[in-house]
C-alpha cells in the first residue's frame, strides 16, 4: 500500500481532490505510515509559524486541542523548546473546550491535561493561556462564552487551529446537530463521546454530561486548520467526513468548505478512504498477490457471490478489468485465489508433522515447537486466541504464556475488597495480617480521583494472576511455563501509562532469549498509539529486533493476533485456525476464569458485550466470511497474520 501514501516530508496544504488518486476526497489529507513522524511534522509547522511571527514581532495565536491525538505533537514542541530554544513568549493559546462542570485541578480536566503535556514544560506566560473555565456559574456561561469569542477576535483570530475528531464527527465538542456558524457555548455531550471518555474517568457515570466548547464558526475562522487522527477507530468517521456530503450530523464535514485545512492521518485511520480500501476504483494499481487477494474478497462482498462464481462481467463492472486483463480470465484467477485462501486454513497452528508443508501456513518441523504467547493483559491470550492456544498444547508443543502487564487497574474496588475480606475472615481475629488490614482501609478510605495505594494495586494484580493461572491450568499448561512480566511502563496506577522504556524491553528480551521459541504470538493491535496493546507490541518488536542476530531467531516466526476489539480483514489473514463447536465452548470456559473481567467490567468501552461474547461473535464472523467466499463452513475461526520483524 506504500505507493498510495502521500509525500512523506510535508503536510503542506493543497486543494483536495486534485489528484486522480484522491478524486473522491473533499478535504486535503496526508497519510503517514507512523503517527510519530506525522506528529513531528505538525509540530514543525507550528514551530515555524511561531518563529516567523516572532521575527515580525507579531503574536502567534494558537487554537489547541486535548485528547490522545495531539499528545505527540506537544511532546515534540516541548523537545523543540528544550533542544532548539523554541520560545513561546509571543504565543497566545485558546483551548477548544473543557468539561462542565470541572475544576481546573482535577486530573480529568483539560487544564490539567494541557499543563501536563505542554504548558508546564515551555516558557509561555501563564496569562497568555486561555482554556474555557469549567467552574463558571451556570447563569454566567453565555456572557463568559461571548467574552471568550471576543478575546480570540481581539487577537485578530486564530492563526492555527489544531483539532482531533471524535467518533461522532465532533470537532471541539461540537456534537452532531451543531450549526456551522455556532460560537463558543455550552453543549451536552453525545453518549458515544462519553463512552469514549469513560476509561479515563474509570466509568461512564463519572464522565460529565456537558462541556464548554468553541463553536464550529470559531474553529472555521482559523487561518489554518490541521486535524489529527490515528487508528482504525477513526476510519469510518473519516471516510464520511472526507468523502461524504456536508451535514450537521457530522460537524467535521463543515471543514470541506475551509480553504486551508489538512487532515493528518495514519494508515489505519485512512484505511476506509476509497483510495486505500478499493484503490482500483481511483487509478492504476500494481497487481501484487496481496492486492489481488484483497480485490477478489472485496468483489465477492460487493456482488454477494463466492469466489468460484465470479465472472468476467463481475470484474469488469466493478473497476477490475485490468486485473482480468493481467490474469487472463476470471476462471483461472478465481481458482488461484480460492486456493490461496484455502491454504490459510489449518487445524495445525504449530505445523503438521510428516505432511507436505509447501502450502501450509506453518512449517512441519521441528515437530514439537517452543511457543511464547504474549498477552498484553492477563486474559487477551484466551479471548483472542483461546482455540489456537488449546490446540497448540494439545498437539504437544511447549507453550509458554507471558502476561505482559499486571492488568491491576481493571479490577474494581469491590472485587479487591471481596478477596481481602475473605482473607480477613479466614485469619483468626486479632491475627489478621497488617497488609490485608491496610488494603481494606485503603479501599474504604479512597476518595474519588485518587489512585490506589501500592498494596491495593498489588492485591489487584495478584487477583488477575490467579485468574490467569486457573485458565492456563484448564488448558494444561504447567505453571512453570506461565510468566508474569509486570512490565514497569504499566505500573502508574492510572489509565495514563509511562512510555516504553529499556527495562520493559529487557524483560521481554530475557524471556525470549531463555525460551528460544520457534513461534511467538503477540497482540497485533496497531491502532491506538498510546494504548497498552500497542506499547506491549512495541516491546515485542524491539526485543525481537535486538535479538535478531542470535542464531535461534532464524527459526522464530512472529504471528499477530488481534484483541477483543477488532479482527484482521480476510485479505490480511495468513493463518486461519478453525474451531469445532466443542472447542468454542472450551475457549468460553477459559475466558470465564477471568471473573473480575466479567459482568460489567471497568473498561467496557462502547461495546456492551462481554469479552467472551465479543470473541465468539468475531470468530463466528470470520468463519462465516470464509464460508461466504465458498470455503468450508466452520463454527468459528481465529485469524493470524505473519509478521516480518
Ligand atoms: C479535545 C476535543 C475533541 C477531541 C476528540 C478526539 O479538546 O475537543 O474534539 O479532539 O474527541 O479525541 P482523541 O484525540 O482522544 O481521540
Image (tube, rainbow, N blue to C red):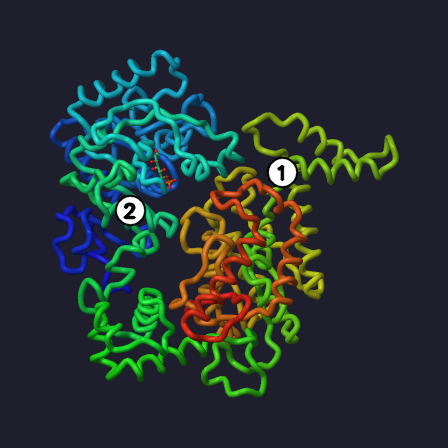
Q: Residues within 10 Å of mark 1 (few under 14, many from 20)?
A: some
Question: Residue at horizontal 33%, vertical 51%?
Answer: 269
Left or right of 222? Residue 103 is: right
**The C terminus, quarter of image:** bottom left
Q: Position of residue 248 (x, y in %)?
A: 26, 36
Left or right of 48? Residue 635 is: right
Q: Position of residue 603 (x, y in %)?
A: 53, 42
Q: Quadrant of ligand 1?
A: top left
Give the number of the disc on residue 40: 2
Q: Is residue 509 above or below residue 438?
A: below
Residue 82 seen from this side: no
Question: Residue at horizontal 41%, vertical 67%?
Answer: 570
Left or right of 532? Residue 290 is: left
User: How far is the residue under mark 1 from the one under mark 2?
Assistant: 38 Å
Q: Secondary structure at mark 1?
A: loop
Q: Position of residue 145 (x, y in %)?
A: 29, 19
Q: Is residue 529 above or below residue 157?
A: below
Answer with mark 1 or mark 2, whichever residue precedes in sequence.
2
**Between 72 and 349, which is closer to the camera in this rendering?**
349
Q: Quadrant of residue 446?
A: top right
Amino acid at each position: 500500500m506504500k505507493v498510495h501514501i502521500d509525500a512523506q516530508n510535508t503536510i503542506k496544504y493543497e486543494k483536495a481532490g486534485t489528484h486522480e488518486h484522491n478524486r473522491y476526497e473533499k478535504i486535503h489529507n496526508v497519510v503517514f505510515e507512523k503517527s510519530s513522524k506525522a506528529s513531528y511534522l505538525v509540530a514543525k509547522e507550528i514551530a515555524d509559524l511561531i518563529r516567523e511571527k516572532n521575527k515580525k514581532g507579531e503574536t502567534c495565536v494558537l487554537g489547541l486541542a486535548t485528547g490522545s491525538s495531539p499528545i505527540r505533537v506537544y511532546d515534540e514542541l516541548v523537545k523543540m523548546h528544550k533542544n532548539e530554544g523554541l520560545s513561546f513568549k509571543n504565543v497566545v493559546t485558546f483551548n477548544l473546550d473543557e468539561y462542565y462542570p470541572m475544576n481546573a485541578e482535577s486530573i480529568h480536566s483539560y487544564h490539567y491535561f494541557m499543563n501536563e503535556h505542554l504548558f508546564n514544560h515551555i516558557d509561555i506566560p501563564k496569562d497568555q493561556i486561555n482554556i474555557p473555565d469549567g467552574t463558571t456559574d451556570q447563569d454566567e456561561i453565555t456572557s463568559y462564552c461571548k467574552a471568550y469569542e471576543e478575546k480570540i477576535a481581539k487577537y485578530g483570530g486564530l492563526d492555527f487551529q489544531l483539532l482531533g475528531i471524535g467518533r461522532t464527527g465532533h470537532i471541539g465538542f461540537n456534537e452532531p446537530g451543531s450549526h456551522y456558524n455556532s460560537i463558543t457555548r455550552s453543549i451536552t455531550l453525545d453518549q458515544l463521546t462519553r463512552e469514549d471518555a469513560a476509561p479515563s474517568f474509570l466509568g461512564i457515570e463519572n464522565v460529565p454530561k456537558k462541556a464548554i466548547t468553541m463553536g464550529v464558526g470559531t474553529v472555521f475562522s482559523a487561518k489554518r486548520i490541521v486535524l489529527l487522527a490515528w487508528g482504525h477507530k477513526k476510519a469510518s468517521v473519516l471516510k464520511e467526513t472526507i468523502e461524504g456530503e456536508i451535514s450537521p450530523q457530522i460537524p467535521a464535514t463543515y471543514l470541506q468548505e475551509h480553504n486551508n485545512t489538512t487532515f493528518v492521518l495514519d494508515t489505519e485511520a485512512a484505511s476506509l478512504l476509497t483510495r486505500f480500501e478499493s484503490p482500483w476504483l481511483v487509478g492504476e494499481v500494481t497487481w501484487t498477490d496481496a492486492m489481488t487477494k484483497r480485490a477478489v474478497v472485496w468483489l465477492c462482498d460487493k456482488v454477494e457471490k463466492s469466489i468460484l462464481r465470479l465472472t468476467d462481467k463481475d470484474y469488469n463492472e466493478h473497476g477490475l478489468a485490468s486485473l482480468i486483463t493481467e490474469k487472463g480470465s476470471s476462471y483461472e484467477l478465481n481458482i488461484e485465489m480460492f486456493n490461496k485462501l484455502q491454504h490459510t486454513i489449518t487445524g495445525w497452528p504449530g505445523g503438521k508433522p510428516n505432511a507436505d508443508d509447501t502450502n501450509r501456513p506453518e512449517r512441519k518441523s521441528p515437530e514439537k515447537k517452543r511457543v511464547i504467547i504474549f498477552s498484553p493483559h492477563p486474559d487477551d491470550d484466551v479471548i483472542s486466541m483461546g482455540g489456537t492456544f488449546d490446540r497448540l498444547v494439545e498437539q504437544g508443543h511447549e507453550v509458554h504464556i507471558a502476561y505482559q502487564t499486571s492488568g491491576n487497574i481493571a479490577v474494581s474496588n469491590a472485587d479487591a475488597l471481596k478477596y481481602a475480606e475473605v482473607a480477613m475472615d479466614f485469619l483468626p481475629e486479632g491475627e489478621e495480617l497488617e497488609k490485608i488490614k491496610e488494603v481494606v482501609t485503603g479501599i474504604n478510605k479512597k476518595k474519588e480521583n485518587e489512585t490506589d495505594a501500592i498494596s491495593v494495586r498489588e492485591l489487584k494484580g495478584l487477583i488477575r494472576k490467579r485468574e490467569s493461572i486457573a485458565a492456563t491450568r484448564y488448558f494444561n499448561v504447567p505453571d512453570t511455563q506461565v510468566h508474569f512480566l509486570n512490565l514497569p511502563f504499566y505500573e502508574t496506577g492510572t489509565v495514563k501509562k509511562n512510555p516504553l522504556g529499556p527495562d520493559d524491553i529487557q524483560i521481554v528480551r530475557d524471556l525470549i532469549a531463555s525460551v528460544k521459541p520457534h513461534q511467538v504470538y503477540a497482540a497485533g493491535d496497531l491502532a491506538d498509539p498510546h494504548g497498552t496493546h500497542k506499547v506491549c507490541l512495541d516491546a515485542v518488536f524491539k526485543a525481537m529486533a535486538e535479538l535478531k542476530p542470535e542464531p535461534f531467531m532464524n527459526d522464530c516466526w512472529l504471528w499477530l493476533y488481534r484483541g477483543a476489539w477488532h479482527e484482521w480483514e480476510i485479505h490480511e489473514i495468513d493463518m486461519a485456525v478453525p474451531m469445532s463447536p466443542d472447542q468454542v465452548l472450551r475457549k468460553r470456559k477459559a475466558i470465564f476464569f477471568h471473573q473480575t473481567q466479567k459482568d460489567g467490567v471497568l473498561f467496557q468501552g462502547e461495546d456492551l458485550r462481554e469479552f467472551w461474547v465479543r470473541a465468539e461473535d468475531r470468530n463466528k464472523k470470520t468463519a462465516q466470511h470464509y464460508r461466504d467466499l465458498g470455503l468450508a463452513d466452520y463454527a468459528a475461526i481465529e485469524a493470524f497474520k505473519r509478521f516480518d520483524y
